[in-house]
Image: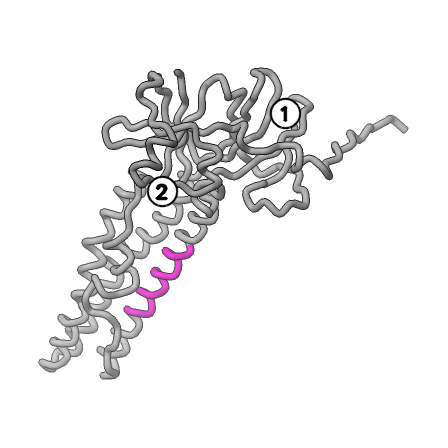
Amino acid sequence: MDLINFKVGHKTISLQILDILLTERYDGNLTSLPNKNPSFLGIKDYMGTPTPIFDLGIILNDQSSSEINRELIQLFKDREQDHKAWLSSLEQTIAHGTPFTKAKDPHQCEFGRWFYSFKTENDDLKALLARFEEPHNQLHQLADKLISLCDEGNKKDALQLLEKERITTYMKLIRLFESAREQIELDHKPIIVFTTLDGRTPHVGLLVDQVEDNVRCDESEIKSLHELTNVGFDIDPQTKRMMRGLIKRGNKHSVIIDPAAIFRPEHLTNYEPEETEEYGLF
């Protein structure tokens, strides 16, 4: 059996090559229709056939990858603001002697608690995040150092060191926050996979994050749904309807999806093809 693997959030799904008509970059130009199914994004014409498009992220993960990325981008914006406020508070403490109440331990600020628990399979983002630790730790260690200088009567030295760290360590951290947001936006290039039941006409389009690779497997390598549920493998009802089986190779798992399990006609009930405007000479 020849399959193509696609990434959807943290999951890898597989489609038989014979079930795929075409993949194309998703640019959001769909015709929307009233519908209560949150995974139904709208209609796109494929060779003159109106084809419903579904977001596999919502179906498999209960949240679209776009929404997950927006939340992550917002998190980096919020944590950047936290550190701007942190440095401003430290400056007030050094300049005016106000109590410093922000986290001195880099593991205890909001970003630190998130940073040391966050996992990602995105290698580019993982490499970028690894660069955060040094400037983030160095910035937080600055608090005790500057407060100690003030306590010893070296307020001027403390202010000079603060200014030096502002244009070096602090700015390095701020640039990393900006780069992380840009990396997330750059990496997310979703595609639509047009599927077919008869090898000719489109059935549904599935929105996925990216194409991974091609694989060939024997039927014997596929774990059936019955085998999985017998060993306590938890499968939500919607995924269960679509799932043909599970492939495990090394530490990697992929779920074989049956696009025929997504019902199509109901999503076309209110669809009317857009009229082509004709232009004449006057």
Classify residue 99 as left or right of residue 11: left
Q: Which residue is mark 2?
A: 234
Q: How many marks?
A: 2
Distance of label 1 from label 2 (alpha carbons): 36 Å
Residue 137, labelled with which disc?
none
Q: Which residue is mark 1?
A: 46
Image height check: is 264 above or below 106? above
Which of the two discs, 1 and 2, labels the residue nearer the N terminus?
A: 1
| Residue drawn at (29%, 60%) of the image | 111
> Which residues, given as a range, are shown in magenta?
74-86
Identify which amino acid the numbered label 1 is placed on.
Tyr
Residue 14's x, y, as percent?
41, 27
Image quadrant containing the N terminus: top left
Give the number of the mark in front: 1 or 2: 2
Residue 123's x, y, as percent?
29, 38
Residues at badges 1 and 2 in contact (C-beta under 8 Å)? Answer: no
| Residue drawn at (56%, 22%) of the image | 196
Can the viewer see residue 176? yes
Give the quarter of the image for residue 239: top left
| Residue drawn at (43%, 43%) of the image | 236
| Residue drawn at (15%, 72%) of the image | 144
Identify which amino acid the numbered label 2 is placed on.
Asp
Residue occupying the far left of the picture: 152
Q: Is residue 144 magenta?
A: no
